Amino acid sequence: MAFERIDDITRADVAFKISAGSPGALFVEAGAALWAAMLEDMGPSSGAPPMRFELQAESIEALLHLFLDELLYHKDAEGLIVVPSAAEVELGAADAIVRCDALAERIDPAVHRFVVDVKAVTMHRFSVRREGGIWTATVVFDV
């Protein structure tokens, strides 16, 4: 599916509504929305090395928040743009797990032109829902 910027939630930050047919696809689209908020050109070249990571949280909402925080961590701590290419989400009775395949590329100011720098994923209006077979999320990024 896709993501769209929402302008009526906040003036100082950047908000998106994200939708997809599955939880895994929702996580991939959320990662794409994060990079679309920050970069003129969204993401690594096709030659970027692959990486895989796994995260666990108590709910799908907490997991999506943690997932986006993980992408920001790689940007800020390691100087990497990590763009999810596929994600598998398991929803259990007591927790949720995501296994993500991604491409990771070292940030190069000559190639990656940042429009803004997202500092954090906020809890303001943060939500994840399943509506009629479609998964949706509302996410606000602190810039």
Image: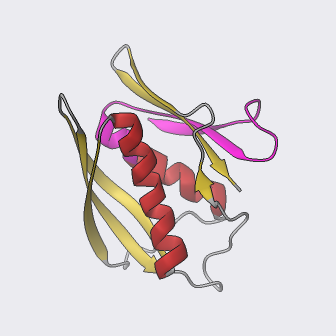
Q: Residue at x 56, y 59 (%)?
A: 35
| Residue at the image position 54 percent from the left and 74 percent from the top | 76
Q: Nearer the viewer, residue 58 or 102?
A: 58
Query: How many callouts does the rendering have?
Result: 0
Residue closer to the observer: 74 or 28: 74
| Residue found at the far right of this picture | 11
Q: Which quadrant would residue 136 be assigned to in this image? A: top left
Does residue 12 belong to the magenta stretch?
yes
Question: In the picture, which quadrant includes the C terminus?
Answer: bottom right
Where does residue 58 sit, x and y in percent of width and height? Answer: 30, 38
Instruction: Tell whether 18 sits left or right of 6.
Output: left
Relative to 65, is 10 above or below?
above
Is 6 situated above or below 56?
A: above
Q: Nearer the viewer, residue 59 or 18?
A: 59
- Residue 4: give x, y in percent of width and height: 61, 37
Quadrant for the N terminus in the image: top left
From the viewer's perspective, tell me whether residue 17 is left or right of residue 67. Answer: right
Taking the magenta stretch, the answer to whether it contains residue 137 is no
- Place residue 39 in its image quadrant: bottom right
Q: Residue at x 65, y 86 (%)?
A: 110
Q: Is residue 104 left or right of residue 12?
A: left
Q: Residue at x 48, y 68 (%)?
A: 73
Rendered image coloring scheme: secondary structure
Give the residues drawn in magenta, as a range: 1-27
Instruction: Kindly give the residue lying farthest to the top in the view shown.
Output: 132
Q: Position of residue 31 (x, y in %)?
A: 46, 53
